[in-house]
Amino acid sequence: MKLIAGLGNPGTEYAFTRHNMGWLCVDNIVTNKNLGPAQNKFHSEFWKDGNIIYLKPLTFMNASGLAVSEAVNFYKLELENILIVYDDMALPFGKLRLRASGSAGGHNGLTSILGALGSLEVPRLRIGIGHAPGSMINYVLGHFPPEERERLDQIIDSAVEAVDTWLNNDVQHAMTIINTVRNQEEC
């Protein structure tokens, strides 16, 4: 069993904001797989497709650990079988980076998850949103300007492909594919 958790914030005002990149990725996957409406489970929108669980925590970003840990504990998942998908200001807009472990890098949603799971050994797919030119809060909760909006579908498609790569490979091989091959391409 594997878990894909896309991070974001509930509410229409956050629907197409930089902080909801993880949600946009999961939305794309469940729509393309025709998984139907979400169940409300684990303080999340929840879908199950065979041995894969898709989760969109409804706890707001800073409390994502509650939702993810509930699902992990219920299914008794090993940490290596979890993938957290989220936005990252440390990467240029549209770049993807897969990591097997590490610190939260200042991302409050990931901090919450790592704290709830008691480990830094949680795979994560970071989707670059670029550096905030001013207020970090306004930037991550801001909507995409037209030039970024034009590229958003392609970026989300690349993130979905990266999730599929992680699902079908061990994390080290997936990192080689995503971090080397994909980042040589222009989004």
Image: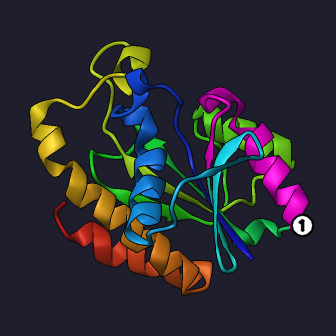
Magenta stretch prevailing secondary structure: helix
Relative to 142, is 20 on the left or the right? Answer: right
Q: How is the image coloured?
A: rainbow
Q: Which residues are magenta?
A: 56-76
In this view, 88 is above or below 175: above
Image location (x, y in percent) of residue 13? 39, 21
For image coordinates 23% across by 49% down, the residue present is 152
In the picture of the structure, the residue carrying the numbered disc 1 is 76
For image coordinates 23% across by 32% down, the residue present is 144
In this view, 21 is above or below 54: above
Image location (x, y in percent) of residue 21? 41, 44
Q: How many marks?
A: 1
Image location (x, y in percent) of residue 4? 61, 62
For image coordinates 48% across by 25% down, the residue present is 11
For image coordinates 47% across by 46% down, the residue present is 23
Amino acid beneath label 1: Lys
Q: Is residue 31 magenta?
A: no
The quarter in which the C terminus is drawn is bottom left
Give the structural element (helix, strand or loop) at label 1.
Answer: loop
In this view, 15 is above or below 172: above
Visible residue check, residue 122: yes
The quarter of the displayed image where residue 112 is located? top right
Circle 1 residues within 10 Å: few <14, some 14–19, many ≥20: few
Relative to 34, is 40 on the left or the right? Answer: right
Residue nearest the observer in this picture, 91 or 16: 16
Image location (x, y in percent) of residue 143? 28, 26
The quarter of the displayed image where residue 158 is located? bottom left
The quarter in which the N terminus is drawn is bottom right
Visible residue check, residue 175: no
